[in-house]
Image (spheres, rainbow, N blue to C red):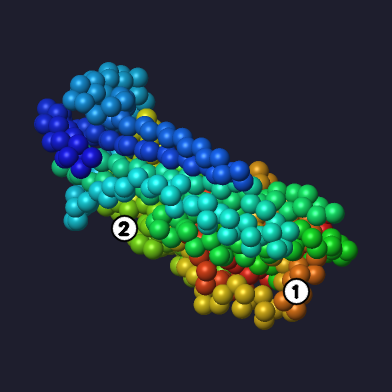
C-alpha cells in the first residue's frame, strides 16, 4: 500500500500542475467486523471504500466532485466535474484554502490485518465462561470491530499531508439468568491499539458489578440528593453533545447557547478540554481534512472558554481562527466542523477511591438520549437514565431517574474528576468520569 500511496502522490502533483487553485483528497477506509457466539460459531464481514474527491476554488465559489478509485482518470474526472459544478455553487465570502505547509511530514502507518479468531481462542472464551458461571452469568456473543482509514490531501499551494484513523472496539453480550431475572446486557470498550484489549479481566469484573446491580432491589426513596458519579462512558456522551454546541457552525446558525462571543461564560474550575490532544491516539495526522496544520488547542481551560471549535469556512463567518477541526466521514463528503481528537483532562483519584470516600454516591453509566432532551439555545437538558446507589461502598439499590439540569450549571458543580479515562462515541472523545454535587435526581 505504501507504494500505491507514493505513486498516488506523484500522480496528484502532476495533475495539479495544470490547476490554479484546487485540492485533491484521497481516503481509504476498511471496516472489519468479527463475531463469535456461545456455540463458537464465527462470522466475519468487511466493508472497504476508497476514492478521490476534488475541490476547485474560483472567485469565492467552491466546486466539488468525487470518484471511486485512485486512477489518474478518476483524478482528472473529479477535477473536471468540480470545475463544471462551480457554475452551480453559491458565492462565499471566504476561500477555504490553507496555504501553510506542515513542518513535519506524515508517515502512514499501515496495520497488518488482525487475526481476531486466533486471538479470541476457544480456551480464552471457555476460561471467561467458567469465571462468569460462578456468579450466574454467561457469555452470549463477542463482537470485534475495527475501522482503519488513511487519508491524503494535496493542494496547489503545495500543502501536503495526511493521517491515519485506527479505531478498535470489543463488545460483549452477557446474559444473567436466575429465578427472578433473565436479561442480557452489553459492555463495549474502545481502543487505539488492538494489542490493548485482550486483558478481559476488568471486563469480567464490570459484568459482575452490573449483575449485582440488576439483582439489587429498587430504591424506595423518591429523591436522590447524594453526589452523582458519571462514569467515563456517561461523560463521553455529555461532552460529545456539549462540544457540538461549541462549533463555529452551530454558533453561526444560532443553534448554540453561545450567541455572544464576547460574553464570558465560566464552566467551573475543574473542566479543561483540549482539541487535537496528543494523548487521544485514535486519529494521528499532521493536517485536518481541510488542510490546516493540526495543533493542540485548549477549548476550555479551568472553566474559561478559550477557543471555538472551527474550520476555516465557518470560522471566517463569525471571526474566529480555525482550530484544525475540519472532518470528512469519507471522500464523498465536503469538510464539516467537528472536534476530532478531544481529551478532557483527568483528575488524581481512581473511581474506587472516590466511591470509598463518599458515604453515599449514585452512579450513572449511560446518558444516551441527552441530545433529544437538550435545548441547544439555553443549555438546559433532561434525560432519563438508570443507575445505582452505593452506600458505605455497598450497593444499596438501583433506580431509574429523571436527570434535569443545565450544562453550564452542571460543569460548575463538578466536585472531582477521576483519574481513569476512556474512549467514547466514535473514538473522538477521551474522557474521565465526573463527580457532580448540588444536583437532585427524581426516582421514576
Mark yes or no: residue 412 visible.
no
Cα distance, mark 2 to mark 1? 44 Å
Q: Secondary structure at mark 2?
A: loop
Q: Nearer the viewer, residue 144 or 115?
A: 115
- Which residue is painted at 30% across and 51% down in the image? 285
Report which residue position mark 1 lands on. Answer: 394
Q: Nearer the viewer, residue 341 or 110?
A: 110
Pointer 1: residues within 10 angstroms few (<14), some, or many (20+)?
A: few
- Which residue is painted at 42% across and 44% down in the image? 147
Between marks 2 and 1 in the image, the one whose residue lies nearer the viewer: 1
- Which quadrant is home to the C terminus? bottom right
Report which residue position mark 2 lands on. Answer: 295
Q: Nearer the viewer, residue 364 or 270?
A: 364
Q: Where is residue 144 drawn, in percent x and y?
A: 49, 47
**In the rendered image of this protein, does residue 340 appear above or below residue 89?**
below
Mark yes or no: residue 301 visible.
yes
Q: Where is residue 182 drawn, in percent x and y?
A: 78, 49
- Which residue is painted at 22% across and 51% down in the image? 107
Amino acid at each position: 500500500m505504501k507504494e500505491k500511496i507514493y505513486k498516488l502522490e506523484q500522480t496528484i502533483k502532476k495533475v495539479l500542475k495544470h490547476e490554479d487553485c484546487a485540492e485533491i483528497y484521497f481516503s481509504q477506509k476498511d471496516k472489519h467486523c468479527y463475531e463469535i457466539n456461545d456455540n463458537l460459531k464465527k462470522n466475519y464481514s468487511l466493508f472497504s471504500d476508497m476514492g478521490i474527491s476534488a475541490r476547485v476554488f474560483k472567485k469565492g465559489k467552491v466546486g466539488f466532485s468525487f470518484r471511486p478509485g485512485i486512477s489518474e482518470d478518476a483524478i482528472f474526472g473529479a477535477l473536471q466535474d468540480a470545475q463544471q459544478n462551480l457554475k452551480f455553487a453559491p458565492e462565499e465570502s471566504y476561500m477555504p484554502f490553507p496555504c501553510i505547509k506542515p513542518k513535519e511530514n506524515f508517515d502512514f502507518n499501515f496495520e497488518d490485518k488482525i487475526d481476531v479468531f486466533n486471538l479470541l481462542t476457544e480456551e480464552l472464551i471457555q476460561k471467561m465462561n467458567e469465571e462468569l458461571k460462578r456468579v450466574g452469568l454467561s457469555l452470549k456473543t463477542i463482537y470485534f470491530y475495527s475501522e482503519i482509514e488513511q487519508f491524503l490531501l494535496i493542494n496547489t499551494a503545495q500543502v501536503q499531508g495526511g493521517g491515519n484513523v485506527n479505531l478498535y472496539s470489543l463488545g460483549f453480550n452477557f446474559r444473567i439468568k436466575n429465578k427472578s431475572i433473565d436479561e442480557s446486557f452489553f459492555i463495549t470498550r474502545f481502543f487505539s491499539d488492538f494489542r490493548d484489549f485482550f486483558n478481559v479481566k476488568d471486563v469480567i469484573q464490570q459484568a459482575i458489578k452490573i449483575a449485582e446491580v440488576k439483582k439489587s432491589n429498587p430504591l424506595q426513596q423518591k429523591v436522590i440528593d447524594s453526589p452523582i458519579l458519571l462514569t467515563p462512558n456517561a461523560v463521553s456522551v455529555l461532552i460529545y453533545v456539549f462540544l457540538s454546541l461549541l462549533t463555529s457552525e452551530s454558533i453561526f446558525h444560532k443553534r448554540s447557547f453561545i450567541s455572544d462571543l464576547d460574553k464570558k461564560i465560566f464552566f467551573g474550575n475543574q473542566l479543561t478540554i483540549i482539541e487535537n490532544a496528543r494523548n487521544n491516539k485514535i486519529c494521528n495526522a499532521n493536517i485536518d481534512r481541510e488542510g490546516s496544520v493540526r495543533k493542540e488547542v485548549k477549548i476550555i481551560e479551568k472553566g474559561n472558554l478559550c477557543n471555538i471549535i472551527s474550520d476555516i469556512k465557518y470560522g471566517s463567518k463569525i471571526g474566529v481562527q480555525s482550530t484544525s477541526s475540519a472532518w470528512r466521514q469519507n471522500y464523498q463528503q465536503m469538510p464539516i466542523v467537528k472536534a476530532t481528537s478531544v481529551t478532557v483532562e483527568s483528575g488524581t483519584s481512581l473511581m474506587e477511591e472516590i466511591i470509598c470516600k463518599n458515604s453515599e454516591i449514585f452512579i450513572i453509566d449511560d446518558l444516551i438520549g441527552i441530545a433529544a432532551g437538550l435545548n441547544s439555545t439555553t443549555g438546559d437538558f433532561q434525560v432519563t437514565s438508570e443507575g445505582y446507589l452505593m452506600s458505605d461502598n455497598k450497593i444499596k439499590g438501583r433506580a431509574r431517574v429523571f436527570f434535569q439540569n443545565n450544562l453550564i450549571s452542571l460543569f460548575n458543580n463538578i466536585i472531582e474528576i477521576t483519574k481513569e479515562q476512556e474512549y467514547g462515541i466514535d473514538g473522538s472523545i477521551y474522557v474521565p468520569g465526573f463527580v457532580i454535587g448540588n444536583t437532585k435526581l427524581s426516582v421514576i
